[in-house]
Image (cartoon, grey):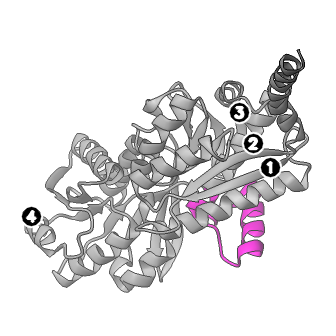
């Protein structure tokens, strides 16, 4: 009799303990993912800074749902396999109710199925490949997508730079770079331009002269390079060494101070599409630039702005959901209508924000705002 009573009591206590633990939890745990190491490390630093700044501001105002926000950060190393590992850890071990991240499309494509299966909402910060949100209804993004970015780049090259012939160079092992060049090619051709070279290179290549010699032989007016900044810097220097004097054009993967630092004058007079410009006079932009610069002693790039925005969008949704339940947060995200640094955010049917793009020129060793292109 006594033994039966103790067993029953033990079962009752076991049943109650999980709820006691939840009641004692004074934090709302979210995950943050970005590449602090690897080929896009500067992107990761800016992204983490954006996450941290947004979380600090929410906590200073009382947090979310009456609790402080705890951001558990993970370095995906720019590697899909590592990305899958850290997304799994954030969900299963750290018990994150939502995840912001990551930067690189190839890594978001590894993490998205994990979030979708667990019904944990995620907002990719700067992953522009269309396939990312196609994974499922728990996957959102804070940035515009490559079809729009590639189209903007092609229109700028054709209309503003008056280019009639273009060549493309990209990393065949990266969904982002490959897709972006494809979209540029499609639009540039539709406008009446001619793609005279379309060459891929293997991931990790450091000598691009074989590909460059081939495409430059066709005398393109512009060279579209959709790679990340580290490769772009080398490509630009080698293209100049081979005698190419025209402009290079690319995407948001160029957005790093390391580009000019490595490439120097080789990228002078070149252009890339981006998500925002720190020179924008809008009060919300200037307020963000001021706060970020004061905290990190550096001006925020687009990666920082998108990470800051993604975090604010997610925490706003948790707040409106009134719950840390993944399905409830997902339902609130769908209804988002929020003004953030990179624009007014409403999600379309594929959970992509409809927003503008800017063209940035590299001039005098600096990034200079050129123009804004509406969706």
Label whose residue precedes the other's in the sequence (3 or 1) = 1
Assign a secondary structure to mark 2. Answer: helix
Give the answer, above or below, for where 77 lies relative to 19.
below
Residue lying at 36% horizontally and 48% vertically, measured from the top left: 150
**At 64% from the left edge and 27% from the top edge, which residue is drawn?**
334
Q: Are marks 1 and 2 in contact (CB under 8 Å)?
A: yes
Numbered disc in front, either 1 or 2: 1
Which of the two labelled residues, at mark 3 and mark 4, occupies the earlier sequence position? 4
Q: Is residue 270 left or right of residue 188?
A: right
Please tell me whether mark 1 sits on a helix, a strand or a loop. strand
- Identify the residue under disc 2: 315
Mark 3 vs mark 2, foreground winner is 2
Query: In the depicted view, which residue is nearer to us: 153 or 179?
Result: 179
Upstream in sequence: badge 4 or badge 1 = 1
Q: Closer to us: mark 2 or mark 4?
A: 2
Quarter of the picture containing the N terminus is top right
Label of residue 69 in the image: 1
Q: Which residue is mark 3?
A: 337
The disc, 1 or 2, on the residue closer to the chain's N-terminal end is: 1
Distance from the alpha carbon under mark 1 to that under mark 2: 9 Å
The residue range painted magenta reads: 278-305
How dense is the environment of label 1, judged by Cα within 10 Å: few (below 14), some, or many (20 and up)?
Answer: many
| Pair 3/4: label in front | 3
């Amino acid at each position: 009799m006594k033994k039966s009573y103790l067993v029953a009591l033990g079962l009752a206590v076991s049943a109650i303990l999980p709820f006691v633990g939840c009641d004692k939890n004074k934090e709302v745990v979210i995950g943050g993912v970005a590449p602090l190491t690897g080929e896009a490390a500067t992107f990761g630093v800016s992204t983490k800074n954006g996450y941290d700044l947004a979380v600090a501001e929410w906590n200073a105002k009382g947090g979310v749902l009456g609790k402080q926000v705890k951001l558990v950060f993970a370095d995906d190393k720019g590697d899909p396999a590592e990305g899958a590992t850290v997304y799994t850890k954030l969900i299963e071990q750290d018990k994150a109710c939502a995840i912001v991240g990551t930067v690189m499309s190839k890594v978001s494509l590894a993490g998205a199925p994990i979030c979708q299966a667990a019904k944990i909402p995620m907002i990719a910060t700067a992953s522009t490949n269309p396939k990312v949100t196609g994974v499922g209804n728990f996957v959102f993004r804070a940035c515009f997508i490559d079809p729009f970015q590639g189209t903007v780049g092609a229109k700028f090259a054709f209309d503003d730079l008056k280019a009639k012939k273009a060549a493309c160079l990209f990393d065949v092992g990266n969904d982002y770079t490959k897709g972006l060049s494809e979209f540029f090619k499609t639009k540039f051709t539709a406008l009446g331009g001619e793609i005279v070279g379309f060459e891929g290179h293997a991931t990790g290549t450091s000598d691009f002269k074989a590909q460059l010699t081939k495409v430059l032989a066709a005398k393109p007016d512009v060279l579209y390079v959709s790679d990340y900044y580290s490769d772009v810097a080398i490509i630009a220097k080698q293209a100049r060494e081979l005698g190419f004097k025209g402009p290079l054009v690319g995407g948001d993967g160029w957005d790093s101070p390391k580009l000019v630092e490595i490439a120097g004058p080789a990228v002078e007079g070149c252009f890339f599409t981006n998500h925002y410009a720190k020179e924008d006079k809008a009060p919300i932009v200037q307020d963000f630039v001021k706060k970020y610069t004061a905290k990190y002693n550096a001006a925020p790039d687009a990666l920082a702005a998108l990470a800051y925005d993604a975090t604010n969008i997610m925490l706003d949704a948790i707040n409106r959901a009134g719950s840390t339940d993944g399905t409830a947060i997902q339902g609130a995200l769908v209804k988002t209508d929020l003004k953030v640094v990179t624009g007014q955010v409403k999600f379309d049917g594929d959970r992509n924000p409809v927003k503008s793009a800017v063209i940035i020129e590299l001039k005098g060793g600096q990034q200079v705002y050129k123009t804004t292109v509406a969706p």
